[in-house]
Amino acid sequence: QVQLVESGGGLVQPGGSLRLSCAASGSRFSTYAMGWYRQAPGKERELVARFTAIGTTDYADSVKGRFTLSRDYGKSTVYLQMGSLKPEDTAVYYCNQHWPTGADYWGQGTQVTVSS
């Protein structure tokens, strides 16, 4: 069974940095079409950044220039380096993989809180 395990969330000061990791196990697609979404209280879940099926990257306009997506095929791990963090970035961050079958797999989420 596919399992996505996130780590790296926590409390950080505005302007600080965090790196989120998502390790995939049981997935035959390695880091194919994996990315990050987030959901803040009272808001819909939104895309933060993702690798597309053809290897390009998509970023939400709100995080462009501040967040960077990367991956390690050998470790089946996707990373999200987050810099210049703002209070508006506070949310639960979810790792996601979209399979060619149309199925989606989700991690359980990790809380990121940006506050002074």
Image (spheres, rainbow, N blue to C red):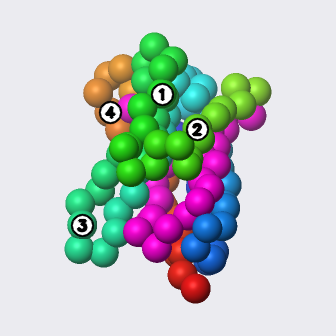
34 in the magenta segment: no
Q: Would you say the residues marked 1 and 4 are in contact, meaning their CB atoms lie under 8 Å apart?
A: no
Question: How many residues crowd mark 2 within 10 Å: few (<14), some (14–19), many (20+)?
Answer: many
Q: Is residue 86 above or below residue 33?
A: below
Q: Position of residue 33 (x, y in %)?
A: 46, 27
Label 3 sits on what residue type? Lys
Q: Which disc is residue 43 wearing?
A: 3
Label 2 sits on what residue type? Leu
91 in the magenta segment: yes
Task: Find disc 2 in the rendering and name its residue.
Answer: 69
Q: Secondary structure at mark 2?
A: strand
Location of residue 115 (image quadrant): bottom right
Location of residue 28 (image quadrant): top right
Q: Secondary structure at mark 4?
A: loop
Q: Which disc is residue 78 wearing?
A: none
Task: Find disc 4 in the rendering and name its residue.
Answer: 103
Residue at image coords 45%, 14% = 54
Residue at image coords 29%, 27% = 102
**Mark 1 against mark 4, which lies toward the viewer?**
1
| Cα separation between marks 2 and 1 | 8 Å
Q: Which disc is residue 57 wearing?
A: 1
Which residue range is magenta in the image?
A: 75-98
| Cα separation between marks 2 and 4 | 22 Å
Label 4 sits on what residue type? Ala
Residue at image coords 50%, 68% = 86
**Closer to the N terminus: mark 2 or mark 4?**
2
Q: Is residue 90 above or below residue 106?
A: below
Q: Secondary structure at mark 3?
A: loop
Q: Would you say the residues marked 3 and 1 are in contact, meaning their CB atoms lie under 8 Å apart?
A: no
